[in-house]
Image (tube, rainbow, N blue to C red):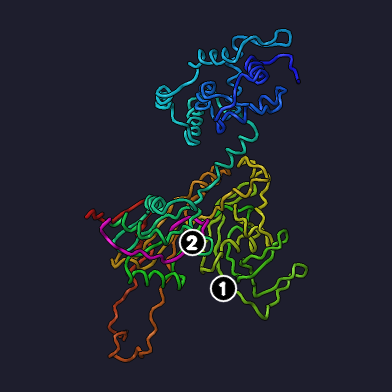
Amino acid sequence: MLQRKTVHIGSSLLRESVKNQSCSISNVVSHPLQNSLRTYLHFCGYKQHPNFGFALKQTKILKQISRTLRTRRQAVSHLDSVLSDDVTDTDDTPPSRKPQDVIQTLSTKSDKFTVGKTRESEFQNKKPRKTGMDIAKELRQKKLNSDEPEKDTEENLVKKAVNAIKMTDFTYVEDEAIAKLIRRHVIYADNKMVIFNKPYGLSVHDGDGISKNVKQVLPMLSKMIYGVSTDVPLSLCHRLDKNTTGVLVCTADPALESHVKKMFRLNLVTRKMWAILVGIPHPQMGIVNIPIGQAQTTDKLTSKQFTRMVARPTVSYDKMTGEETARSFSRGQTAITKFRVMDSSRDVSLVEFEPETGVKHQIRLHAADCLDCPILGDHKYSKMDSLAPQKVPINILNRFKLPPTKTRYIPMHLHQSQILIPDVFDHPEKRHLVVGARMPVHMDRALRLFRLNPGKPSQWKVKAIPPPQLEAPPSDPSNPLFRNPQAETDLSNVKPVDPVDQCVFVFRSQLHVKYKKY
């Protein structure tokens, strides 16, 4: 028989009871502690006895233990701890207590266990189990209440820098929250049109892989502006890229919608877009007139194909000789962009673009491929054949306090600051509308970091609308366009009307709408 130097009195009494066969077998076969006690006795040196068992009277305390303790192993260990409070058994002092004394000992110590009504009262007074959300709230509250500042380790500094430039992801944002956000960014609203400053990272139209966009929240936005009981349909007149902020025009009148879309289609809408470029363009003012087209390219690293706009110039230039040769075939769309450097610092510049045409990704491509100065945060057009994050000079990263491995978090710094729409109003003196939008937070922060000053704004020039062409001869007196030179007065002293004086300038929120509650 296996002997141990020191065992609890519980195990020695159980061994004695099995040896003397004082515990007769009973009908308690399905007792929850039977398997655990059998394993326990086997560990102490006894094989399974054919007459091993416990009577109902002798297992009453064990049933009480099993109600409170969850696992069988805990029940057995807890039983040993209770028995070991009084006496310990060694090889020198053989056990002298009988099994009946064990049961009496357990009965006297049963106040440690809860049975019956006492157990129910315990569960009533028991505190509710904490969830993960409760623990997280407690940790946040401890951080807020703690007077000790966080340690400025390298990891914490990188996290702070990333959180400072990380933008909102609208994938899991509800439509109502997006509509409220756009409502706070409304610049101008009347009974016929709504103009707002589009947030960063929000698509205008739906498409593949786009779950949230401006178009799907326009009905909610209409009710927030015109009233809950109203049903005014809003329609988009143009579009902006997902990562581009700035002025976005919506109309509520079908006649005005067709007019504004026609102005955009004829390139009569004047737009001014501000961008922070990596590098300084040379010359600092000019016009880029290079057609662009869409093409399929392959990433060198991943061999993945993606769609990208590429430059398709009509003239090829030889750098060695300086000769220009006309190309016989070019499948590109006409793209003309005016640019002006407003301010520059080391390796960065603030440039104002004025696109004359409206081709997809026109400014981004002209800045990256034609001026060789990509927009800061434009990871798609920074490289010709790669989708890797943009390579930024180390001095720019130091301003953002970012390591080179975190450049993918830098947002694109492109903003449509102002827009001029001609012939919007029916007023004879004020016919045009000029709307300006504030810069987003990340661009404002970048201007402060790089100490860039936009300076004085450039002058507006209203594009002349071509008159309708009529084939009626002007010499016919019956023609309403007939002009008699003899009847005309001298107009030399009359000053021409400046189209800019006929503009209504809106740079702060103006709502000319009466909200209807019912």
Give the percent coordinates (x, y) of residue 98: 61, 12
Give the percent coordinates (x, y) of residue 20: 66, 17
Give the percent coordinates (x, y) of residue 44: 70, 22
- Secondary structure under badge 1? loop
The relative height of residue 6 versus residue 446 in the rendered view (above or below) is above
- Residue that extends furthest to the top in the rendered view of this protein: 93
Q: Residue at left 70%, top 76%?
A: 325
Quarter of the image where one finds residue 255: bottom left
Label 1 packing within 10 angstroms: few (<14), some (14-19), many (20+): some
Please indicate, yes or no, whether residue 493 appears anywhere in the rendered image: no
Q: Which of marks 1 and 2 is in front?
A: 2
- Secondary structure under badge 2? loop
Image-based side of 480 in relation to 304, left or right = left
The amino acid type of the residue labelled 2 equals: Leu
Q: Name the residue beneath numbered marker 1.
A: 334
| Magenta stretch in the rendered image | 227-247
The relative height of residue 295 versus residue 149 in the rendered view (above or below) is below
- Whether label 1 touches label 2, CB < 8 Å: no
* Residue closer to the observer: 339 or 2: 2
Please indicate, yes or no, whether residue 251 appears anywhere in the rendered image: yes
Image-based side of 420 in relation to 413, left or right = left
Label 2 packing within 10 angstroms: few (<14), some (14-19), many (20+): some
Circle number at residue 240: 2
Image-based side of 252 in relation to 306, left or right = left
Quarter of the image where one finds residue 380: bottom right
Whether the magenta-drawn stretch holds residue 353 is answered as no
Label 1 to label 2, Cα distance in Å? 19 Å
* Residue closer to the observer: 27 or 428: 27
Give the percent coordinates (x, y) of residue 438: 44, 50
